[in-house]
C-alpha cells in the first residue's frame, strides 16, 4: 500500500489532509518494507512516519527511543489520536500488562528504551509475535561521530538482524554527512535508503543583535511574544538572575533551569513549562533535550551560543507545531573574547576545529545578508538569497566599508600600548583631551583626533566587529590588544565591511509580514483556549495534546457549527472529534 492510499487514514487518525515535506516518501518506503534512514529537521513530523504505519499495518510497531520524557510525551499524543500505544521503560510500572497486550496483538505502537530492547526478555517477546516495523528514533546515538553516542544503541543491531524480514526505519534530526554514513552502516540500511530533508525551518524567524542594553532588549522581545518561550543564558547564576528580572518586569511565570538544581526541581520546571501557555524558562543549554513541547513561541539567547549547530538546535525548539516562532540572539564582543580564552585551554587537537566554529558564528552575527541563507549554507545547502523571515531580510541594514576606520582604530590600540578599553580608544580617536588622556600623553599621538563627526558612532560597533573576527582581542585586564587577524587589516589586505549600526535603522513592527500570530483580543479564540485548558486539566495532559493553537485559530475563523464541518479542520481527527468536538462546538455556538 502506498502513502497515497493512506491519505484517508491520515485524515481520520490525525486530521491532516496532506503529508508534509518528505513524509510521504518515508511512509512509501516503510510500507514497501524497505530499510530507511530519515534525516529531517525538528518539527518536520518524523513521528508520523511510523505512527501512521502503526495504524495501517497488522502487527505492532516497535519504537526505540532514548529519552523517557520524550517517549511519554509521544505516548500521550498517540493515545489522544486513538492509537493503542504503550511504553516499556524503567519507570513504567505496567510492564507485565504491556507485554501481555503485545502478545495478544492488541497494541499498535510499543515504545521501548534501548537498554530494554537489547535484553533477552525483549527478544523472546518479539519471537512470540513478530513486529511490523522497527523504528529507531534519535538514530545518531548509534554513531560515535554523532553528538550523543550511546553504547546501548550498538547492541540493537543483533536484535534487528534476528528479524531480517522486519523493515527498519531510523530517524534523526541532526546528523552530518559522516554521521549519516555511519548510521547506515551500523544499522544495516542500504545507501539508497537515505531520505534527507532540508534543514530549513521556515516558520522560525531569526534575529541577531548586538547586546546593548540586554534587559531592555529582552523585555521588548518578550512583550511582543506572549506565548511560551525559552531564554538561554550561558551560566547557572545568569539564568537565575534573568528569571528574577524577567518575572518582576513581565509579571509572567518565569523559572530558571540548569544542571545545578536538584532533579526534582528540574522535573517540576519542565513539567510546568510543558503544560503552560505562557510560561518562560531561563536555561542553560541543558534545557530542552528531553522535551517535546510543540508550541514554544520564542527562543532568545542572552549571549552567543556555542556554535552554529547549537544555535540551530536551540532555536529549533521553537515552533515545532509549524506556527510562527520568533528568535532573538544578543551577542557582545566579550562573548567572543571569553570563547577565545577557552580555546586556549583546549587540547591541541581540538583547537583548529573549535576556532573554525567560532569564526563561522562571527560571520553569522556580522552578516548583513539573510541569516537563514547563512545558516543553511553552513549545513551544506544552497538556499535562496532572501528568506523574507529574518531581521536582515525584513529590515535590511546598509553595509558600510569601515576598512580605513578599522586601520585607524587598530593603530590607536597599538600606539597606546595595547592595554586600554574601547572607551579610552574612542576618546583618543575623537580627540577628547581629558585628564586621563593628557596625563598619558595620548593627545600627542598621531592618531589623536583623527576620527570626526558621523564616523565616530561607528567606533563601538566596529570594536565588536573586529573582536568577532579576531582582529582585536582582550588582555587579562580587559584592555584591547591586536589579534591574529589585525595584520591583514592594517596592511589593507582584508576589507572590513560592517552593518550600519541599528541606531539609524528604521524601526518596524517586530511581527512584520507573514507572522500569523494568534489573534489578540478575539473573544472566541480566548474562549476556545479556556475550554482547551479545562479539558487538558481533566485529561491530565498539556493543552497542545488536545488541539494545537493553529486548530483553535481555524475554529475561530471558520466557526463550524456541526461535527462534520469541524472534522474538515486540519488537526481534527476522528478520535479527538469524538472526545472533544462537542465541547468546542458548544463554545462556538455561544459567540
Ligand atoms: P519531529 O519529531 O520531526 O520533531 P513531530 O513528529 O513532533 O516532529 O511533529 C511536529 C508537529 O508537526 C506535530 O505537532 C505534528 O502534529 C505536526 N505534523 C506532523 N505531520 C503533519 C502533517 N502531515 N500535516 C500537518 N501537521 C503535521
Ligand atoms: Zn532572511
Image (cartoon, rainbow, N blue to C red):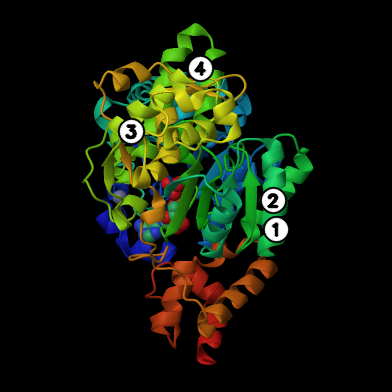
CB contact under 8 Å: marks 2 and 1: yes
Percent across and percent down for residue 123 are: 56, 28
Badge 2: how crowded within 10 Å, few (<14), some, or many (20+)? many
Asked if residue 449 is positioned above or below residue 1 in the image, the reply reads: above
Instruction: Identify which residue is drawn at 58% across, 58% down.
Output: 219
Percent across and percent down for residue 131 are: 47, 39
CB contact under 8 Å: marks 4 and 1: no
Mark 2 or mark 3, earlier in chain: 2
**Left or right of residue 102, residue 412 in this image:** left
Residue hosting label 1: 247
Mark 3 or mark 4, earlier in chain: 3
Badge 3: how crowded within 10 Å, few (<14), some, or many (20+)? some
The disc at residue 243 is 2
| Mark 3 beta carbon near ligand 2 (under 8 Å) | no
**Left or right of residue 23, residue 341 in this image:** right
Mark 3 or mark 1, earlier in chain: 1
Mark 2 or mark 4, earlier in chain: 2
Of 479 and 373, the residue lying toward us: 479
Q: Is residue 319 visible?
A: no
Instruction: Identify which residue is drawn at 41% across, 17% down.
Output: 353
Residue hosting label 3: 405
Q: Nearer the viewer, mark 2 or mark 4?
A: 4
Q: Quadrant of residue 164?
A: top left
Mark 4 or mark 1, earlier in chain: 1
Amino acid at each position: 500500500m502506498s502513502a497515497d492510499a493512506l491519505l484517508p487514514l491520515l485524515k481520520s487518525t490525525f486530521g491532516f489532509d496532506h503529508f508534509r515535506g518528505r513524509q510521504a516518501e518515508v511512509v512509501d518506503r516503510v510500507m514497501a518494507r524497505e530499510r530507511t534512514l530519515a534525516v529531517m529537521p525538528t518539527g518536520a513530523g518524523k513521528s508520523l512516519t511510523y505512527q501512521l504505519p502503526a495504524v495501517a499495518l497488522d502487527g505492532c510497531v516497535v519504537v526505540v527511543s532514548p529519552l523517557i520524557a520524550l517517549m511519554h510525551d509521544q505516548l500521550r499524543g498517540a493515545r489522544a489520536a486513538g492509537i493503542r500505544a504503550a511504553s516499556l521503560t524503567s519507570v513504567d510500572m505496567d510492564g507485565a500488562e504491556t507485554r501481555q497486550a503485545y502478545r495478544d496483538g492488541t497494541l499498535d505502537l510499543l515504545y521501548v528504551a534501548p537498554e530494554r530492547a537489547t535484553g533477552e526478555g525483549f527478544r523472546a517477546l518479539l519471537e512470540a509475535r513478530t513486529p511490523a516495523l522497527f523504528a529507531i528514533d534519535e538514530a545518531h546515538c548509534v554513531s560515535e561521530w554523532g553528538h550523543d553516542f550511546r553504547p546501548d544503541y550498538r547492541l540493537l543491531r543483533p536484535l534487528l538482524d534476528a528479524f531480517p524480514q522486519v523493515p527498519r526505519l531510523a530517524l534523526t534530526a541532526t546528523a552530518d554527512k559522516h554521521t549519516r554514513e555511519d548510521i547506515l552502516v551500523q544499522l544495516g540500511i542500504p545507501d539508497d535508503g537515505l531520505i534527507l530533508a532540508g534543514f530549513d525551518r521556515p516558520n522560525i524567524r531569526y534575529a541577531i543583535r548586538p547586546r546593548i542594553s540586554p534587559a531592555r532588549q529582552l523585555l521588548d522581545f518578550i512583550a511582543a511574544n506572549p506565548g511560551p518561550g525559552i531564554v538561554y543564558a550561558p551560566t547557572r547564576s545568569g539564568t537565575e538572575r534573568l528569571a528574577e528580572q524577567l518575572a518582576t518586569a513581565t509579571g509572567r511565570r518565569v523559572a530558571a533551569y540548569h544542571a545545578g538544581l536538584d532533579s526534582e526541581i528540574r522535573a517540576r520546571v519542565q513539567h510546568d513549562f510543558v503544560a503552560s501557555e505562557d510560561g518562560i524558562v531561563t536555561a542553560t543549554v541543558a534545557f530542552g533535550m528531553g522535551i517535546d513541547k510543540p508550541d514554544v513561541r520564542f527562543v532568545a539567547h542572552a549571549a552567543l551560543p556555542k556554535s552554529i549547530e547549537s544555535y540551530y538546535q536551540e532555536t529549533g525548539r521553537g515552533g515545532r507545531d509549524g506556527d510562527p516562532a520568533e528568535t532573538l540572539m544578543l551577542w557582545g564582543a566579550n562573548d567572543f573574547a571569553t570563547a577565545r580564552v577557552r580555546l586556549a585551554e583546549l587540547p591541541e587537537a581540538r583547537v583548529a576545529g573549535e576556532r573554525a566554529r567560532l569564526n563561522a558564528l562571527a560571520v553569522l552575527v556580522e552578516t548583513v545578508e539573510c541569516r537563514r541563507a547563512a545558516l543553511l549554507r553552513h549545513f551544506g545547502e544552497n538556499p535562496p538569497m532572501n528568506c523574507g523571515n529574518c531581521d536582515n531580510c525584513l529590515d535590511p541594514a546598509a553595509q558600510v566599508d569601515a576598512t580605513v576606520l578599522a586601520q585607524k582604530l587598530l593603530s590607536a590600540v597599538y600606539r597606546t600600548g595595547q592595554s586600554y578599553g574601547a572607551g579610552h580608544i574612542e576618546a583618543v580617536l575623537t580627540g577628547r583631551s581629558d585628564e586621563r588622556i593628557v596625563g598619558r600623553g595620548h593627545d600627542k599621538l598621531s592618531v589623536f583626533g583623527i576620527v570626526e563627526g558621523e564616523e565616530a558612532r561607528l567606533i563601538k560597533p566596529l570594536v565588536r566587529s573586529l573582536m568577532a573576527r579576531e582582529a582585536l582581542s582582550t588582555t587579562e585586564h580587559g584592555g584591547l590588544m591586536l589579534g591574529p587577524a589585525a595584520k591583514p587589516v592594517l596592511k589593507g589586505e582584508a576589507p572590513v565591511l560592517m552593518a550600519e549600526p541599528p541606531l539609524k535603522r528604521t524601526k518596524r513592527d517586530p511581527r512584520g509580514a507573514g507572522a500569523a500570530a494568534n489573534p489578540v483580543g478575539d473573544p472566541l479564540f480566548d474562549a476556545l483556549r479556556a475550554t482547551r485548558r479545562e479539558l487538558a486539566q481533566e485529561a491530565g495532559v498539556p493543552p497542545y495534546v488536545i488541539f494545537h493553537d493553529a486548530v483553535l485559530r481555524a475554529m475561530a475563523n471558520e466557526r463550524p457549527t456541526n461535527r462534520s464541518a469541524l472534522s474538515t479542520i486540519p488537526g481534527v481527527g476522528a478520535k479527538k472529534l469524538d472526545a472533544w468536538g462537542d465541547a468546542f462546538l458548544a463554545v462556538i455556538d455561544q459567540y
